[in-house]
């Protein structure tokens, strides 16, 4: 009991932090705009087992957090299991060993039962009394990719534990009525008694017989009956028909239910290639019958469709804000994300523009999460998505042509390894691994390659249908594009200047200076020009153009920014680009502390840009709920950076322009994560060991030696094309080398990766 009280104290402290962070912001009532739901009201957020995407399902943590972090009318969803003595508990899987430690507590308790025609092995609630379960068994996270530090911290929740916290609405799902009947339990009797003691707003089941038996027992004004559809080929126990067949007779379902709960694929199928297919007519057909439609299966940490670009809010919007229909509610493991999608992004036809003074949205190789980086398509998408600053990391070919690409190594962002493997070399001054470098190939050779979209991890492919789409962009082309599209500004990132000058005879600083001058960027102030480099000697070369803003890229992770190195930076730069981990420290996927780095730079009037933000949930600490919007809110609203460097500018623009961000009375508060607060819910003895503190920034980390003179190196076959006169890129066919070793291709592919 004492341990349970300590857990509740930790929960209350965590909630108090959240409440404090929203002080002065009163939540508005449900929006008055018309939705395409059956009743025209806002779709419901239904929390499956509370916030089960982060905490063990139906635990006190999960239920309290779902209430605190979600829309005010969020529904708590409990999947009913009956114990040996007929008490209801909340767990989705009938096998308790999938979400508790019961197998360790009762190692000889495994049984095999027939569950709707299937032989199921495991530990079952019907074999244990409520006292045996509550006093001895603890909850665990049933999804291995989710945090395990909250395992064994909470007992199983009885139904009255969930209703006891007084949720706005409560949904009870009776999934195994036939199974309970076989074990001499009546779910119907339990529900009838429960309704006299607690409010049940929604009662659902995948069994027609159960719902029909309850039709005359419930007050249909207070309790809605909902028929749950399981997999299309599964058999409904009462009718002995497939659920896909029952779907064809919605009129019959209307005779005993007021709504249906269906897997989201019933509404918007995902094709085998993971792109969306055409929507079905299910929602409109059901609405014509007067049936509400609730979609299930939403979770931020499940890879859905490439159409959503790893932004889970896009998926919710697809179901609640399209020109044809809106579902009446979504059943989700991540109710905060569903809440922000519905409360802030959906049905906001007049979303405001980003307010002046908000953090800049700076691209990383354009919209490189959507199209191959640094291509015309990536830049066009970035502008369409609302980027403030589009970037070009300048590389040079052997014959002096400047063009945009993430690194000098062509392997990651082009098809170079299938054509020029024989030109692979190791350049320790640039990187420890071998590569095919731009300065070893002529521009005409580079143009024979195709762009290649980069992915964070192998299992997280990006838009594979456009894997090699677009064309390379020379620096002059990039500058022309920026002027034509009237983007707010450009960032020119200069890399490897000293090496190129001394070892390759290439003057990248001079080439960039000439290109900017030829495009008249040095003679105007309408569009911002940011010059970025990790070399202070490079930045010093641009001090004679006062309209240019110089950005020092600090690649090492730092934990502090003392005054002396900061003042040294101020001699060369107006801004710094620093890694996310230098701003918010992370340990085992939990944030631990907000450093003072941003504040120390801003005290000296040096802007701070955080890099690199990505949508893929695998790149996000648990504190951000597998939601890239939450990370953006944390850096912009919490750490108060001056800009974010992102591969998904559309996601950042969505946050910056949504009405919840730009009003004092939002429908929903998108909260910045409080660094260390989530980890504080874990008992100290279960927390991961503290990591070694990051080192402070040193003056020696800042000041670089002067650039060496440009060596006089004569190329074997010089090109007549200069950087300023680079022709428009062409999409020539890629020619594979006949004698290329497939083994070497695979090895080089495996060693390529994108840093965190």
Image (cartoon, rainbow, N blue to C red):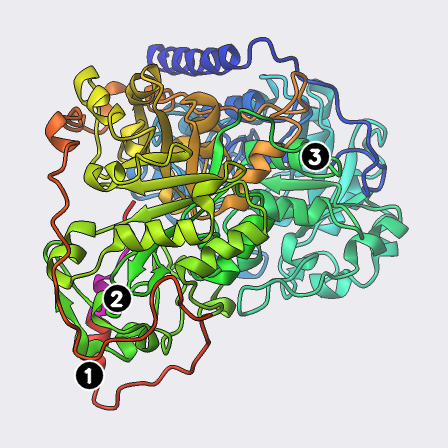
Instruction: Tell me the quarter of the image containing the C terminus.
Output: top left
**Taking 717 as reference, is 79 above or below it?**
above
Q: Earlier in the sequence, mark 2 or mark 1?
A: 2
Q: Which residue is mark 2?
A: 438
Find residue 232 and report its horizontal and vertical position in percent: 65, 63
Q: Nearer the viewer, residue 364 or 70?
A: 364
User: Where is residue 598 drawn, in percent x and y?
Assistant: 33, 22
What residue is pinned by disc 1? 741
Q: Earlier in the sequence, mark 1 or mark 3?
A: 3
Quarter of the figure with the N terminus: top left
Viewer-proximal residue among 503 and 657: 503
Left or right placement of residue 251 versus residue 631 in this view? right
| Element marked by disc 1 | loop
From mark 3 to mark 2, how far is it between C-alphas?
A: 43 Å
Residue 175 falls in which quadrant of the image? top right
- The residues bearing labels 1 and 3 have C-alpha atoms spaced at a distance of 54 Å
The quarter of the displayed image where residue 614 is located: top left
Camera sees residue 30: yes
* Residue at (68, 24) in percent of width and height: 667
Which mark, by number, is residue 352? none
Residue 564 located left or right of residue 356: left
In the shown orientation, is residue 327 left or right of residue 455? right
Whichever of labels 3 and 2 marks the residue nearer the N terminus, that label is 3
Magenta range: 748-753
Closer to the eye: label 2 or 1: 2
Residue 365 seen:
no
Label 3 crowding class (10 Å Cα cut-off): few <14, some 14-19, many 20+? some
Is residue 413 inside the magenta stretch?
no
Taking the spot 31% from the left edge, 85% from the top edge, the residue there is 736
Q: Nearer the viewer, mark 3 or mark 2?
A: 2
Residue 696 position in % (x across, y down): 16, 24
Which label number is shown at residue 351?
3
């Amino acid at each position: 009991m004492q341990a349970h009280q300590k857990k509740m104290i930790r929960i209350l402290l965590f909630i108090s932090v959240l409440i404090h962070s929203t002080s002065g912001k009163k939540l508005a009532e449900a929006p008055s705009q018309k939705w395409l739901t059956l009743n025209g009201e806002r779709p419901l957020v239904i929390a499956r087992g509370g916030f089960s995407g982060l905490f063990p399902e139906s635990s006190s943590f999960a239920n309290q957090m779902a209430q605190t972090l979600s829309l005010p009318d969020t529904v708590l969803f409990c999947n009913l299991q009956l114990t040996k003595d007929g008490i209801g508990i909340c767990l989705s899987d009938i096998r308790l060993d999938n979400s508790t430690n019961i197998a360790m507590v009762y190692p000889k308790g495994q049984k095999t039962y027939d569950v709707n025609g299937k032989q199921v092995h495991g530990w079952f609630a019907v074999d244990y009394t409520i006292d045996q379960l509550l006093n001895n068994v603890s909850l665990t996270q049933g999804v291995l990719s989710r945090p395990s530090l909250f395992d064994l911290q909470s007992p199983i929740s009885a139904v009255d534990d969930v209703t006891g916290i007084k949720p706005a609405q409560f949904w009870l799902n009776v999934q195994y009525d036939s199974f309970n009947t076989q074990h001499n339990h009546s779910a119907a009797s339990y529900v009838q008694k429960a309704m006299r003691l607690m409010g049940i707003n929604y009662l659902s089941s995948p069994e027609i017989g159960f719902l029909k038996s309850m039709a005359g027992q419930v007050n249909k004004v207070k309790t809605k009956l909902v028929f749950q559809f399981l997999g299309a080929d599964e058999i409904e126990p009462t009718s002995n028909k497939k659920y896909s067949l029952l779907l064809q007779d919605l009129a019959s379902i209307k005779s005993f239910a007021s709504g249906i709960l269906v897997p989201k694929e019933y509404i918007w199928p995902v094709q085998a290639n993971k792109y969306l297919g055409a929507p079905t007519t299910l929602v409109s057909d059901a609405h014509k019958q007067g049936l509400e439609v609730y979609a299930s299966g939403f979770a931020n940490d499940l890879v859905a469709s490439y159409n959503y670009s790893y932004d889970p809010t896009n998926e919710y919007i697809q179901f609640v804000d399209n020109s044809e229909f809106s579902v009446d509610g979504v059943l989700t493991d991540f109710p905060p994300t569903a809440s922000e999608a519905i409360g802030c992004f959906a049905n906001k036809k007049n979303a405001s523009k980003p307010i002046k003074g908000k953090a800049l949205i700076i691209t990383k190789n354009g919209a490189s999460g959507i199209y191959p980086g640094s291509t015309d398509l990536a830049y066009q998408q970035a502008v369409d998505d609302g980027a403030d600053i589009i970037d070009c990391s300048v590389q040079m070919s052997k014959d002096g042509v400047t063009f945009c690409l993430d690194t000098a190594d062509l392997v990651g962002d082009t098809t170079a390894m299938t054509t020029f493997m024989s030109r692979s070399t190791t350049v320790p001054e640039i990187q420890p691994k071998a590569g095919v470098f731009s300065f070893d190939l002529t521009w005409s050779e580079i143009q024979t390659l195709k762009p290649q979209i980069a992915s964070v991890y192998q299992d997280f492919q990006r838009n594979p249908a456009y894997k090699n789409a677009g064309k390379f962009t020379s620096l002059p082309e990039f500058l022309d594009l920026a002027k034509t599209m009237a983007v707010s500004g450009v960032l020119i990132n200069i890399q490897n200047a000293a090496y190129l000058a001394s070892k390759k005879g290439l003057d990248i600083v001079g080439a960039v200076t000439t290109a900017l001058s030829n495009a008249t960027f040095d003679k105007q102030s309408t569009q911002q020009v940011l010059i970025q480099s990790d070399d202070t000697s490079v930045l010093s070369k641009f001090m004679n153009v006062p309209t240019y803003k110089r950005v020092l890229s600090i690649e090492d992770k730092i934990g502090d920014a003392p005054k002396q190195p900061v003042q040294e930076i101020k001699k060369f730069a107006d801004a710094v680009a620093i890694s996310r981990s230098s701003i918010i420290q992370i340990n085992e996927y939990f944030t631990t502390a907000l450093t003072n780095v941003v504040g120390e730079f801003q005290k000296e009037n040096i802007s701070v840009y955080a890099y690199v933000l990505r949508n893929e949930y695998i790149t996000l600490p648990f504190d951000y709920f597998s939601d890239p919007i939450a990370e953006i809110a944390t850096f912009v609203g919490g750490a108060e950076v001056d800009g974010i460097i992102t591969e998904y500018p559309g996601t950042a623009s969505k946050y910056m322009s949504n009405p919840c961000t730009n009003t004092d009375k939002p429908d929903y508060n998108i909260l910045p994560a409080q660094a260390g607060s989530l980890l504080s819910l874990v008992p100290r003895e279960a927390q991961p060991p503290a990591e070694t503190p990051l080192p402070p920034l040193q003056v020696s980390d800042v000041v670089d030696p002067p650039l060496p003179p440009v060596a006089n190196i004569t190329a074997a076959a010089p090109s007549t094309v200069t950087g300023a006169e680079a022709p428009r890129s062409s999409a020539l066919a890629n020619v594979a080398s006949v004698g290329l070793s497939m083994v070497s291709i695979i090895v080089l592919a495996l060693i390529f990766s994108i840093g965190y």
